Amino acid sequence: MSAGSPAYKLYLAPMEDVTDPAFRMLCKRFGADRVYTEFVNADALVRDVAAATRKLQISDSERPVAIQIYGREPASMAEAAQIVEQAKPDFIDINFGCPVKKVAGKGAGAGLLRDVPKMLEITRAVVNAVKTPVTAKTRLGWNEEQKIIVELAEALQDCGIAELAIHGRTRAQMYTGQADWTLIGEVKNNPRMHIPIIGNGDVTTPERAKECFYKYGVDAIMVGRATFGCPWIFEDIKQYLAGEIEEKRQRSMSWCVDILKEHVERSIEWIGDERKGIVHSRRHFANSPVFKGLYDFKQTRIALLRAESKAEVFAIMDEIVQKWGPEFNQAL
């Protein structure tokens, strides 16, 4: 692949309490080639639970978009997929990778890595239930001793999925340690594999994205936690791959803060409640690279995380800009 080639695809990873419409639209604006919804509980969809059906709201302006579902029973997953299809997503994604106890501990998400026959049964049921392309996202295996992804990828492909995303950690690792991309590369270079392979895990810089494309040959890269408070990371990666920038992009403090403010406003609009919208977007200003490394920032950060009105949040952000100067550059 040549630098800047259209083959370099960047996707926003599905993340609970993160990839709502407000954030998806920002990431789309900055170059995400595909966005994913938060995961949706299949059983809740079948029961028509409002909180679950609300997650099916997508717009044409964010396409291509995938709606992700999770569950532990083939029948309910198939029925949920049919409900999802009515929302007309471009892809229906199956979550076989969530490691948290409330999901994996109940036999869904990454929990199905301990029951591969059922995982495959669920996959076949979903694929057969809908006409929309079905994709899947999983991990290397349950733990260090059970890294089964190479054989599992073949089996999932045989079930009819259109693409496979692989997070380079086991369930036991959760989000600790380093993502291991060697097995992702092995899956991609397996001559039996013909579907696109998406790599995920620890892509936090344009340099790392380029390395993953060149070294492991993946068809796309999925960016997750590195997008927190930094939706412009997609633009930075693409400009780096195209040779338009040679290192981390230098962005002004005022520009970055304006984007964070816009996200707060979009969250409030989406949720329909000022305080809840602010609380929902806190993880973004708590983790944004905009404020990392600033001297004596601890108390300001605490104040930001305690603010409960838009006026208060914006006033604190404005004070930060004034203190450091609107043209203060961060390597983001």
Image: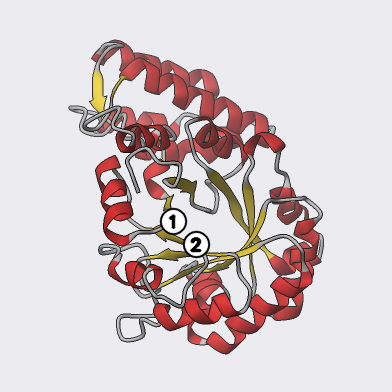
Tag 2 or tag 1, which sits nearer the N-term?
2
Mark 1, other Cα within 10 Å: few <14 / some 14–19 / many ≥20:
some
The residue lying toward the viewer, choosing from 220 and 59, is: 220
Q: Are marks 1 and 2 in contact (CB under 8 Å)?
A: yes
Q: Residue at x 46, y 29 (%)?
A: 307
> Can residue 49 be seen at all in this image of the molecule?
no
**Residue 283's spot in the image, x, y percent?**
44, 41
**Residue 229's spot in the image, x, y percent?**
41, 35
**Residue 108's spot in the image, x, y percent?**
58, 75
**Residue 112's spot in the image, x, y percent?**
53, 80
Q: Residue at x 40, y 29 (%)?
A: 304
Q: Residue at x 49, y 79 (%)?
A: 154
> Which residue matches tag 2?
196
For residue 150, the mark is none
Q: Locate residue 39: give its quadrant.
A: bottom right
Residue type pointed to by label 1: Asp
> Which residue matches tag 1?
219
Residue 119 against residue 251 in the figure, above or below: below
The residue lying toward the viewer, choosing from 119 and 155, is: 155
Q: Locate residue 47: give its quadrant.
A: bottom right
Please state the total of marks drawn on the protein image.
2
The residue lying toward the viewer, choosing from 199 and 284, is: 199
Residue 131 against residue 106 in the figure, above or below: above
Residue 112 against residue 188 in the figure, above or below: below
Residue type pointed to by label 2: Pro
Q: Locate residue 123: give its quadrant.
A: bottom right
Label 1 secondary element: loop
Q: Residue at x 75, y 72 (%)?
A: 78
Using the numbered discs, state the Cα–Cα distance from disc 1 to disc 2 in whole angstroms. Answer: 6 Å
